[in-house]
Image (cartoon, rainbow, N blue to C red):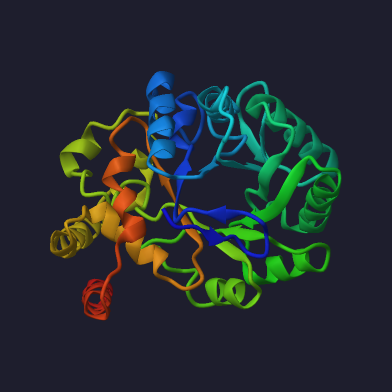
Amino acid sequence: MHTKQLGDSDLFITPIGFGAWAIGGSGWQFAWGSQDDSESIAAIHEALDAGINWIDTAAVYGLGHSEEVVARALRGMNNRPYVFTKCSMVWDERREISHSLKADSIRRECEASLRRLRLDAVDLYQVHWPDPDADIEEGWATLAALQKEGKVRHIGVSNFDVAQMKRAQTIAPITSLQPRYSLIHREVEEQILPFAERENIGVIAYSPMASGLLTGAMTRERMAGLPADDWRKRHPDFTEPRLSANLKVVRLLGAIGRMHGRTPGEVAVAWVLQHPAITGAIVGARRPGQILEIIGAGETHLSPREFGEVEAFLARKVA
């Protein structure tokens, strides 16, 4: 699988990375339902065997559990993939989540992540959310200090807007940005992606398949069967009136995919990857077989005509 340089770093990443949100399991606010750790580990191994060379996780995923599972999957590997994680979302003894960009909090998070991941240094450490906004400078200065201390190799941001990135840049360069980006969530196209491209900030998109909605496997029946603690049950994208409109997008992706021998999900991810600002896309998997249904996205190139079909369809959908 080909690789692409992430910003100005020495990280050369595959177009698809393994997303470890869902493998955090149940029992927290943004869970995807219960999860079998052995299946998570098998899915990670399958992704690495397919050529994927980076894993994206976060301390908050499963309240530390996702990082622990990643560490178990990588145990004993001589040539491990890059490991990216995030800070700023913290929890208390009641498992209630809050946000902090205070220096002492970020330092505690970093040490805890290193212990859970069993690493001497994180390859990419990211601010998960710019919240509280007033503490962005303190938080980013702390990440820059951790980088100088060798505890993290590179530093990035997630969910930042242009003004917030400019504030961070006055303190230290930004290696990467992680925004939400998919066919049905395109709010970053107008200002954020052009800024990142101009500034040579690498972009790794999350939710390129809109949290599974654009895979082709999501139906009304499957939605009805999701467990009560799956956050998608409560999200507007997965409920009416948006659900019907989004499923029409999936049918279009299926039609384009058949011309390439690809799944709707592969077309959705390929569409994201063809934006010139995008370095890579995060694809989550919970069990073996799922990554193999998407891996072809990195080698799929949509024609101008196909892009036009998508744009025309979305324009009609919005109208």
How many callouts does the rendering have?
0
Residue drawn 71% across the image and 52% down it:
154
In which quadrant is the C terminus drawn? Answer: bottom left
Give the camera-side residue of 129 and 152.
152
Residue drawn 59% across the image and 39% down it:
58
Asked if residue 32 lies left or right of residue 194, the reply is left
Q: Residue 146 sits in which quadrant? A: top right
Whether residue 307 is visible here, answered yes or no, is yes
Asked if residue 16 lies left or right of residue 79, the reply is left
Establish if 150 lies above or below 277: above
Residue drawn 67% across the image and 55% down it:
156
Establish if 308 lies above or below 93: below
Whether residue 88 is visible here, answered yes or no, is no
Asked if residue 94 lies left or right of residue 104, the reply is left
Establish if 27 lies above or below 147: above
Establish if 210 lies above or below 227: below
Q: Residue furthest front?
A: 78
Where's residue 307, x and y in %? 27, 75
Where's residue 127, x and y in %? 67, 50
Q: Residue 245 sits in which quadrant? A: bottom left
Q: Residue 268 sits in which quadrant? A: bottom left
Where's residue 231, x and y in %? 40, 38
